Amino acid sequence: MNHSRTTVEEIKARIPIEELVASYIKLEKAGKSFKGKCPFHNEKTASFFISPERGGYYCFGCNAKGDIFSFVEQFEGLDFRGALKVLAEKAGVPLVTEQKADSEKDRLFQITEQAAAYFEMQFEKSVEAKDYIKNRGISPETRTSFRIGWAPEGWRNLHAYLKGKGWNEAFMEKAGLIKLAQQPQGQVQQSQMQSSGQAGKNAPSYYDRFRGRIMFPITDSSGRVVAFTGRILKDDGKSAKYLNSPDTPLFNKSQILFGLDKAKTEIRRVGYSVLVEGQMDLVLSHQVGVKNSIAASGTALTDQVQGENGVVSNLGMVRRLSPNMIIALDSDLAGRAAAMRVVAATALSVGMSVKIADIEGGKDPADLILSDPESWKLVLRNAKHVIEFELANVMKEVTDPHKLAKAVRDRVFPFLIRIDSEMDKAFYVKKIAEGVALTEQAVWEDVRKYEKTKQNQDASLKPLSERATASEKEVRRQQATTPMAEGMRAGSAPGSSLHRLDLVERRMFGLLSLMESSKIPLATDYREQIRKIAGPTYEERIQKIEPIMRDLSFEAEAFFGNDQKRSDIHMKELIMNFEEDLINADLITTMGELRLAEKAGNTLRVGELANKCQVLSMRKAEIGKRKHI
């Protein structure tokens, strides 16, 4: 599926990078550029810069960089084609998909799409599937929007359909659509398939993974089908109520949440997400206007925001959209316990603010929405922060005052210690102190003890190779803030020595690049001055710095701004510093050679080197005078 450069360029021309990024994160003007807090790592001070002139972005904290396509890829956890689909829709540029796909991943997207279309076609033929959806309160429009389908009963219906489309069984299995029967179970299934007339005597023992189920396609954030969840229609007492696709090259349970593609815009708009448990909860929530809902069904939340190869997790994606989440799972005790586990293990640990929606009366969100949509919205409005929610539960359930403090430590502190903000912690410590009739100081002392114990427990579970003493951690912290570390983060090669000359050179060439791209007339003169000062080392320096020149331009734009008068002043100063540092380096080398010549008794060489030292010293003094004019 090759897209011409004109398609990509047309999309870039229609979507200014500052507008695209501003639709994801809050930006503020910074000269001709824009800046904001980086969405790709935690930070308190904005270090993420966007340059409309270059059509790119750069983060000085984590080195994230690129154009509108790489931004969408990084933010939404998509490949290039997924980003292309998202941006083409935003730009109103049609994409023509070729029949022949370029890669295995492209073909997997094709087969899952054809499977989804097949399930939709089968839904239209099934009276019982239509009746089920109608009885669950799902409108025809919602059913179509979520592409809800039907997998008919029978062992090899989808298999036969895809076979007729030219797909082989190995590929169907890789997409998670069929299974290979295993012995001895396979013998029974093989016999059943043969008796049903759907397999010949020598037929391979592959069978459809989904049979007799209402089908919910799971999509990535660009809307491409990657997997399925099937809800059984006739409970036989043996089969799982819900059946999910296995992990495949397209589908990883820790990276995709159901409904996120439809919810992402609304999550950004309203500033929070609503996490429900099942597909029905999600579909009906969207149907009544709560379109910022996402579902955990079929997926596994992880507290790892970004995994290997830069793939963003489902929770990482939601947090980038908004750090605020309401969890609304089933109202029974098991459901509440599940909600607590989700909060403890995931959202709080990555710095999210989490509230719990308390659904009373034994209903799940789908039941509540069906009976009274406004009550569902009221439940969400009345959601309580997880600390307040669990504290209230403890106060209600534990009536013995002697056991109350321990219950608070066991059930509330695990959430409290995961909150990053000390101000927020102080607020909830006060709430806890009021609730258990203790002083805030006493609660703080217990919190610190609990926190220390938990840290020691966590550390003891780590392999020895991953453990570090407090002093080792402090050394690492100091190393991470040295000029060497700063230079490496900005693009210096690992192991290279970064000193003043390196920093001056980086800023000088970055500012020069910025001036040249802005077509400032004096830029040509400045480059010639630098070339003359560097002499025979000029080309070597250019080769060394060229790979990171784009990054240096961003750095210069952020550091110096775009004012021409200021740029001229800064460039003159940088060139003088560059020349002074080169003279210093040459002077140090020459003086070393002079000492060796004196030791060797080489009078002629001593004279030559002494004269050179004198000339270099005079040049250095001259630069010093120019700098103070």
Image (cartoon, grey):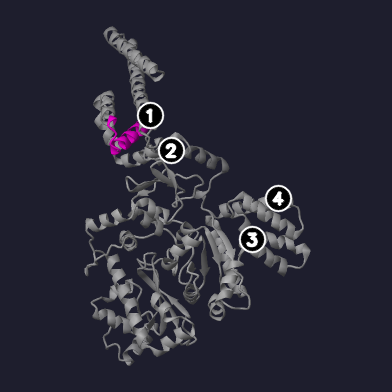
Q: Residue at x 50, y 70 (%)?
A: 290
Q: CA distance from mark 3 to mark 1?
A: 52 Å
Q: Which residue is mark 4?
A: 445
Q: Residue at x 38, y 39 (%)?
A: 557
Q: Is residue 406 above or below residue 507?
A: below
Residue type indicated by callout 4: Glu
Q: Nearer the viewer, mark 3 or mark 2?
A: 3
Q: CA distance from mark 1 to mark 2?
A: 21 Å
Q: Is residue 29 above or below residue 160?
A: above
Within-10-Å neighbours for mark 4: few <14, some 14–19, many 20+: few
Q: Which residue is mark 2?
A: 486
Residue type indicated by callout 3: Ile
Q: Which residue is mark 1?
A: 570
Residue 517 image label? none
Within-10-Å neighbours for mark 3: few <14, some 14–19, many 20+: many
Is 508 a magenta residue?
yes
Q: Which residue is mark 3?
A: 387
The mark nearer the N terminus, 2 or 4, is 4
